[in-house]
Amino acid sequence: MLWILLAVFVLLNTMAYFHAYKFTHFVDAEIERTNSPANLSRSQKLKTLLFGITIPKPENDGEPNLPFETINLRSNKEIECWFIPTSNAIGTVVLFHGFSGEKSSLLDKSEVFNGLGYNTLLVDFMGSGNSEGNQTTIGFLESQQVKTCFEYLKERGESNIYLFGTSMGAVAIMKSLSESDIKPKGIILECPFGTMYQTVCARFESMNAPTFPMAGLLVFWGGIQNGFWAFDHNPTEYAKKINTPTLLLHGARDERVSQKEIQSIFNNLVGEKSKKSYPNAGHENYLLQYKKEWTNDVSIFLHKQAHNNK
C-alpha cells in the first residue's frame, strides 16, 4: 500500500509539474493550440492529461487605426508598447491585457479612451505579442512592467496617468501598486482574481474536475518553476495597500472569478472606490455586450478624477 501511495504521489506531482510549465510557458506561435477536450481523440486526451495543454505565444493580429508610435521599454524583460496620441489630451491611460492576450486585443477599449480625450499606451506583457520571451507569471513578474510603463510616461512629462487592466492585467496593476511608490491618478480593474489558488481552482471547476489535490500542486510547481511562492500571489491582500481611486468591474456570470472574490477585493481597497457589475457578462470583453454601459462607467470615473485633480 505504501508503494502504491508513493507511486500515486510521484505521478500526480509529475503531471502537475508538466501542467504548470505548459501553463506558464507559451510555445512557438506556429504550433497549434490544444483543442477543447470534446474535440480530442482518446490518445490526445491522455497526452493532454499527462503533459498539459499547449498554448502558442499570443500574436498581435491588428494595429491601431490612428497614428501611433511603437516603443520598446526595458523592464525585467524587454516589452513592446503602442503609444496612441490624441489632440488636447486630458491624460494617458495605460492598458494591460489578460492571460494569453496581447495588446491588439485592447484596441477597442483604447478607441473608447481616445474618444474620451486620453492618449493610450497599449502594452505587450513579457511572453506575449512582440515582447521578450515566452514566459508568463499570471501578473507576478508582470507587476514590474506596470511600474516601468508608469515611470516611462512620467519621464515623458505626463502627469495625469491612469492604469487599466483586465484579469491578469488587473492583478499586475494591484501587485505593482501594493509594493512600489507609483501613484497613478486612478485605476480601472476588470475581473481580478482573489488569489492564485482560487483562479486555478476555478479552471478545474469550469471543466467539472475535482480541485484537490491537483490545484494546489499546480500552484506549488508553477511558483517553483518561475521563482516565487505562488500561494502568496494574493490580490485580495494587495488591495489592502491600494489607496488610489479605483473602479472595479465584474461580470455577474463570470465562471473564473466569483462575486465573493470581487467583493473581498472591493472591501479591502483603502482609497476612494466604486464597483460595477454587468448582469449577463462572463469572463470576457465587456464591450461585446455592454459597450454603452462600460463607456459610461469609465467616463464618469475618469471625469470625476480629472475634476478632483484640478
Image (tube, rainbow, N blue to C red):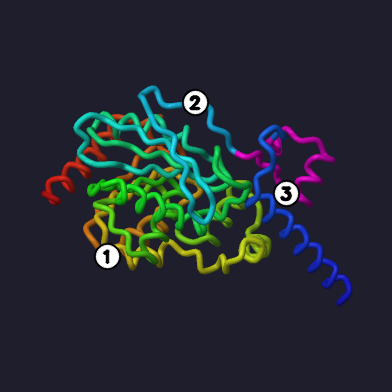
Residue 283 visible in the current orientation: no
> Mark 1 near mark 2, Cβ–Cβ under 8 Å?
no
Disc 2 residue type?
A: Gly
Residue at image coords 44%, 39%:
71
In 3D space, how far apart are the residues under numbered discs 1 and 2 (Cα atoms)? 38 Å
- Neighbor class of circle 2 (other Cα within 10 Å; few <14, some 14-19, many 20+) is few
In 3D space, how far apart are the residues under numbered discs 2 and 3 (Cα atoms)? 29 Å
Question: What residue does disc 3 label?
Answer: 52
* Image location (x, y in percent) of residue 268: 32, 65
Q: Which residues are magenta?
A: 33-57
Nearer to us in this view, 275 or 156: 156
Question: What residue does disc 2 label?
Answer: 62
Looking at the rendered structure, the secondary structure element under dot 2 is loop
Q: Quadrant of residue 302?
A: top left
Residue at image coords 58%, 67%:
228
Disc 3 residue type?
A: Gly
* Image location (x, y in percent) of residue 178: 37, 65
> Any magenta on residue 150?
no
Q: Answer left or right for 43 relative to 161.
A: right
- Neighbor class of circle 1 (other Cα within 10 Å; few <14, some 14-19, many 20+) is some
Of labels 2 and 3, the one closer to you: 2
